[in-house]
């Protein structure tokens, strides 16, 4: 599987670290709603098809990417930087 880093170009998936589901919303840090925290920590969807994910280019420029990957074919349809800059540089 190849992921195209916006700074380094196409790279093998072995250079990246999966950081989690890109759709999950974390409860407020001071929230005492145990149901919300249990859902955030333990509940996982297993979608078939396109899925939003967060990956880090840990073997390269270390940027975090928002990747859309098809869970059936592992084809990556997009990979964009989570933030609009790299290491403080425009």
Image (spheres, grey):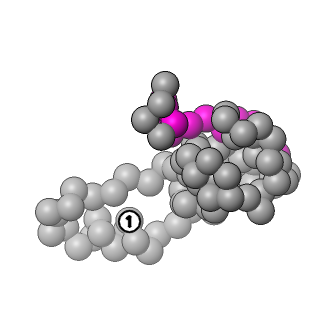
Question: Is residue 58 positioned above or below 90 on the image?
Answer: below
Q: State which region is magenta.
A: 75-86
Residue positioned 72% across, 39% down in the render: 8
Helix, strand or loop under label 1: helix
Find residue 32 and report its image quarter: bottom left
Q: Position of residue 47 (x, y in %)?
A: 65, 56
Residue positioned 19% across, 67% down in the render: 33
Query: In the depicted view, which residue is nearer to us: 6 or 71?
Result: 6
Q: Position of residue 9 (x, y in %)?
A: 77, 37
Residue positioned 38% across, 65% down in the render: 40
Query: Is 27 left or right of 46, judged from the image as shown?
Result: left
Question: Is residue 40 positioned above or below 72 on the image?
Answer: below
48 inside magenta stretch: no
Q: How many marks?
A: 1
Query: In the depicted view, which residue is nearer to us: 4 or 88?
Result: 88
Question: Is residue 39 positioned above or below 75 on the image?
Answer: below
Query: Is 16 left or right of 89, judged from the image as shown?
Result: right
Q: Residues within 10 Å of mark 1 (few under 14, many from 20)?
A: some
Query: Is 52 left or right of 30, judged from the image as shown?
Result: right
83 inside magenta stretch: yes
Q: Which residue is mark 1?
A: 40
Residue positioned 67% across, 34% down in the render: 6
């Amino acid at each position: 599987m190849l992921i195209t880093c916006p700074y380094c170009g196409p790279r093998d998936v072995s250079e990246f670290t999966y950081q989690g589901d890109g759709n999950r919303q974390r409860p407020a840090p001071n929230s005492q709603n145990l149901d919300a925290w249990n859902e955030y920590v333990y509940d996982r969807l297993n979608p078939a098809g396109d899925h939003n994910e967060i990956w880090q280019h840990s073997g390269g420029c270390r940027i975090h990417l928002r990747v859309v990957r098809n869970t059936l074919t592992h084809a990556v349809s997009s990979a964009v930087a989570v933030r609009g800059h790299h290491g403080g540089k425009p």
